[in-house]
Amino acid sequence: MRILVVGKGGREHALVRALAESPGKPEVFCFPGSDAIFSIAQPVEADGLETLVEWMKTHAIDLCVAGEESYLVKGEGLANLCEKNGIPCWGPPKESAQLEASKEFAKNFLLRNHIPTARATATETLEEAVSAIAGEYPTVLKFDGLAAGKGVAVCPDEASALDFLDEVFTQKRFGEGRVLVEQCLTGPEVSVFAAIIDDQYLIFTPARDYKRANDGDLGPNTGGMGAVASRRLVSQEILDQIEKEIVQPTVAGLRKEGLPYRGFLYFGLMLTPTGPQIIEYNCRFGDPECQAVMPLVRGDLAEFCLAGAKGELRSDLISFDDGWSVCVILASAGYPETSRNGDEITGLESPSDARVYHSGTRRTDRGTWETNGGRVLAIVAGAADRAEAVSKAHAAADLVNFDGLQRRRDIGILHFD
Ligand code: AMP
Ligand code: GLY
């Protein structure tokens, strides 16, 4: 089997590795990829989606796997173009990827399908937003579009809300778009992933993303400073509730509304005192949750995704390790506000009992590795119990270093029950 994975981050490094390690030993290609990914997948030259799909056709690609969301909604849409050209694609078409690309679309979908979510009002101007907030703080403001994880502000007071509204409506930091004013929910967050294939689904191991920059869940929001994954992260009772009240009505809603879906769907949830509520959909796996979850997947992920892309749910092909997986992110100086490139990374070969996925690195002419982005590396270790997975992951992370390295010491330790 020949697979092309689209994306370039730590999530894609984990996906490529999981696919490449599938028993059938598929040949894996990656676009645009990264230096680290190219040690296990072959690079692809393309200057746009059309040429990429043309390349897939001429190189007899059996399966395209969408890692990153942006390609799903670019131009005609990656999955749409694949479909037109008869290439099975694991990832939804553009119309369904609006669940991630437009927060307003997602909110209306949730409301139409009676899926528990926060109340929200769509606003077009700063004045409308202020009036929708109606003095109720904290409030949550969401830019209605893809903003690379930067488009959401949880505002404790009027001053922070006005700052965000000024960035959106006056400075147009994210381009043109509306703002959803949303009720602020409270409770622990959990990321649930399902493989959705038309009217069928399979729920993967749930994970928790540590979004804040500093220990104790303090500091600014980031793309994710680490993750922990385990079936035991949430109780069976809550998992059942999530399946019944959130996953099933989502799958039914997609069918009812004629939105085709074959691929991973990410349910960003908050376990509120009145039950799980959805805060966002993403039409892909999470990053860094993917790095934590993939090592728990047993069986043949490549065949599973190929069968799924062709419309068949083959739950018999994969299973999930019952243990714990902990992912510690090493970030560069200045992250999340900025990032610093060019710091030499040492100790990369040292962790023997952990997996190292590259998020933002570059291979130098001398064959060494240096930082090349905000999130640099994900160090992942697993064990049957949580404490052991935590100590293995942190011990492995201790062995890797670069100037300005930032990491959290409580990943996997800080718990939410
Ligand atoms: P999102 O980009 O939608 O994942 O939002 C980023 C983060 O903002 C989430 O992970 C939550 O921590 C927070 N957030 C989003 N929506 C809400 C909400 N309605 N209430 C409280 N926090 C929220
Ligand atoms: N971990 C958050 C995300 O992938 O959006």
Image (tube, helix red, strand yellow):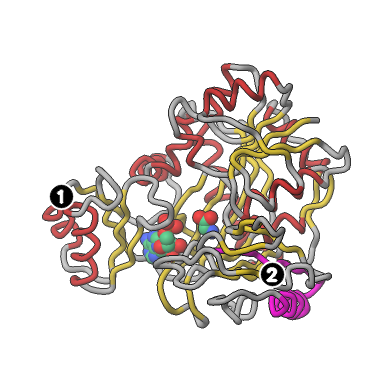
Quarter of the image holding residue 109? top left
Quadrant location, the N terminus:
top right
Check residue 226 for magenta coloring.
no
Q: Please give the residue where the numbered disc 2 appears in the rendered image.
A: 326
The vertical placement of 91 against 234, above or below, is above
From the top left corner, tell me how far across and down residue 240 is, in percent. Answer: 63, 56
Residue toward you, 10 or 314: 10
Please state which amino acid type lies under the numbered disc 1: Thr
From the top left corner, tell me how far across and down residue 324 is, in percent. Answer: 74, 68
Q: Which residues are magenta?
A: 375-399
Which residue is located at x 66 percent, y 24 percent?
A: 56
The vertical placement of 117 against 221, above or below, is above
Check residue 389 for magenta coloring.
yes
The vertical placement of 81 against 218, above or below, is above
Local crowd size for mark 2, using a 10 Å CA cut-off: few (<14), some (14–19), many (≥20) = many
Residue at disc 2, secondary structure: strand
Which residue is located at x 61 percent, y 64 percent?
A: 370
From the top left corner, tell me how far across and down residue 22 is, in percent. Answer: 83, 44
Residue at disc 1, secondary structure: loop
Q: Please give the residue where the numbered disc 1 appears in the rendered image.
A: 125
The vertical placement of 279 against 197, above or below, is below
Quadrant location, the C terminus:
bottom right
In this figure, what is the number of numbered marks? 2
Residue toward you, 231 or 359: 359
**Residue 323 appears left or right of 208:** right
